[in-house]
Image: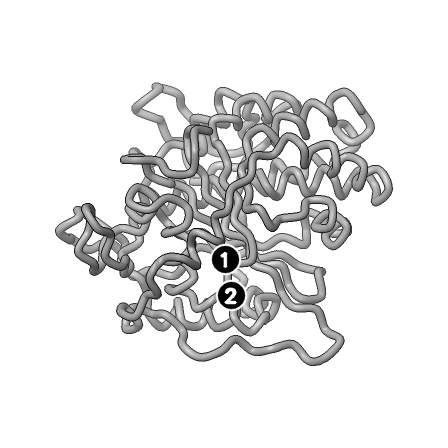
């Protein structure tokens, strides 16, 4: 959804986008996520679990630094601390220092990672990454992702994925390509092999389905990436941008679904990223070697060497080169 609002604002033109950003910014919820994350005890263990140590490469004088946005998708808009809930969508959006490309890295909810001790909940050790949100909300998740990747998180965005249905209908639906016919056992709906046009109801089913897919949560992640890519393209189409009523409705609905950190200046962000287009976005998922049985249930084992290569590219602002040598990750085709 963050990509959607940026795409809509960008496509509106710089002058109009700034006015829209100021309007939308007043509807977006805010919370001191980064301040709360920095107040948590520093993680000193778990370095053997992929984290890239050492300082990030600093840009040469006059070159802008890259930006990293942690996007957490949840199913309710109630406060940041979610009790026993989970954040089933975890994405790190890396905007290159030259602002010409954005790489979106997904972390499957069952990724087996190190989470530090959480009094009353957890003694510390490896478990599924989405437990971090249940035990410590967005601040703990921010700390865990930052420690795992070795990347500084500049901004945090929480998205209410329940808004997918209405947002999809506002833009007139989106088209996705499915590799083979698959049925969603929960709703009984069947997605046919080939191009499927998704209205709001079908889009919500599509991005939520996990059971019945060959690769489970990995396929769900691919679907979410594919949906966001298609939605961004639809938003940038003339059908949305030339209709002020539809554009206002879209931006207002997206704004209502967001909670961001207190330091995120939406107007300034739009100014910096106003030229990004659909083809400037690339998607990938952290490398893994398959499933492993753990005390927390079946989890996804990380591919240590693969993750190190990806995380090093993030830290050194070389994601464009990474996608050039990992072309398979750029393809957006749903399960």
Where 252 sits versus 68, above or below? above
Q: Which residue is mark 2?
A: 326
Residue placed most toward the observer, 152 or 281: 152
Q: Are marks 1 and 2 in contact (CB under 8 Å)?
A: yes
Residue placed most toward the observer, 322 or 270: 270
Where 49 sits versus 4, above or below? below
Q: Secondary structure at mark 2?
A: loop
| Any part of residue 234 in sight | no
Q: Residue at x 57, y 38 (%)?
A: 1
Q: Crowding at label 2, few (<14), some or many (≥20) Cα neighbours within 10 Å?
A: few
User: Taking 105 as reference, is 107 left or right?
Assistant: left
Q: Which residue is mark 1?
A: 329
Residue 133: x and y in percent read 34, 44
Where 187 sits versus 284, above or below? above
Residue 104: x and y in percent read 54, 53
Colour treatment of the image: one colour
Q: Residue 233: name its quadrant.
A: top right
User: Taking 122 as reference, is 21 left or right?
Assistant: right
Q: Secondary structure at mark 1?
A: helix
Residue 302: x and y in percent read 31, 62
Q: Residue at x 60, y 77 (%)?
A: 58
Q: Residue 243: name its quadrant.
A: top right
Q: CA distance from mark 1 to mark 2?
A: 6 Å
In the rendered structure, find residue 278 and report the number of the disc placed on it.
Answer: none
């Amino acid at each position: 959804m963050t990509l959607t609002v940026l795409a809509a604002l960008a496509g509106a033109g710089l002058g109009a986008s700034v006015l829209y950003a100021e309007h939308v910014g007043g509807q977006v919820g805010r919370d001191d996520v980064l301040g709360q994350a920095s107040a948590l005890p520093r993680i000193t263990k778990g370095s053997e679990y992929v984290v890239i140590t050492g300082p990030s490469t600093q840009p040469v004088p006059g070159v802008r630094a890259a930006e990293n946005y942690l996007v957490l998708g949840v199913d309710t808009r109630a406060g940041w601390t979610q009790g026993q809930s989970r954040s089933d969508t975890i994405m790190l959006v890396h905007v290159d220092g030259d602002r010409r490309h954005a790489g979106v890295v997904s972390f499957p909810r069952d990724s087996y990672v190190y989470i530090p001790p959480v009094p009353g909940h957890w003694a510390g050790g490896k478990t599924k990454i989405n437990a971090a949100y249940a035990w410590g909300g967005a601040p703990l998740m921010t700390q865990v992702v930052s420690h795992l990747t070795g990347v500084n998180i500049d901004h945090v965005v929480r998205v209410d994925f329940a808004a997918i249905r209405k947002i999809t209908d506002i833009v007139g639906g989106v088209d996705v390509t499915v590799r083979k016919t698959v049925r969603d056992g929960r709703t009984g709906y069947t997605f046919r092999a080939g191009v499927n046009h998704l209205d709001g109801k079908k889009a919500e089913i599509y991005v939520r389905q996990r059971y019945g897919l060959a690769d489970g949560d990995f396929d769900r992640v691919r679907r979410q990436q594919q949906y966001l890519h298609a939605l961004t393209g639809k938003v940038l189409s003339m059908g949305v941008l030339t209709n002020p009523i539809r554009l206002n409705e879209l931006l207002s609905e997206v704004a209502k679904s967001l909670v961001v950190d207190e330091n995120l200046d939406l107007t300034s962000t739009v100014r910096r990223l106003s030229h990004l287009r659909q083809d400037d976005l690339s998607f990938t998922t952290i490398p893994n070697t398959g499933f492993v049985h753990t005390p927390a249930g079946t989890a996804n084992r990380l591919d240590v060497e693969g993750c190190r290569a990806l995380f090093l590219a993030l830290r050194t602002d070389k994601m464009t080169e990474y996608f050039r040598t990992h072309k398979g990750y750029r393809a957006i085709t749903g399960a």
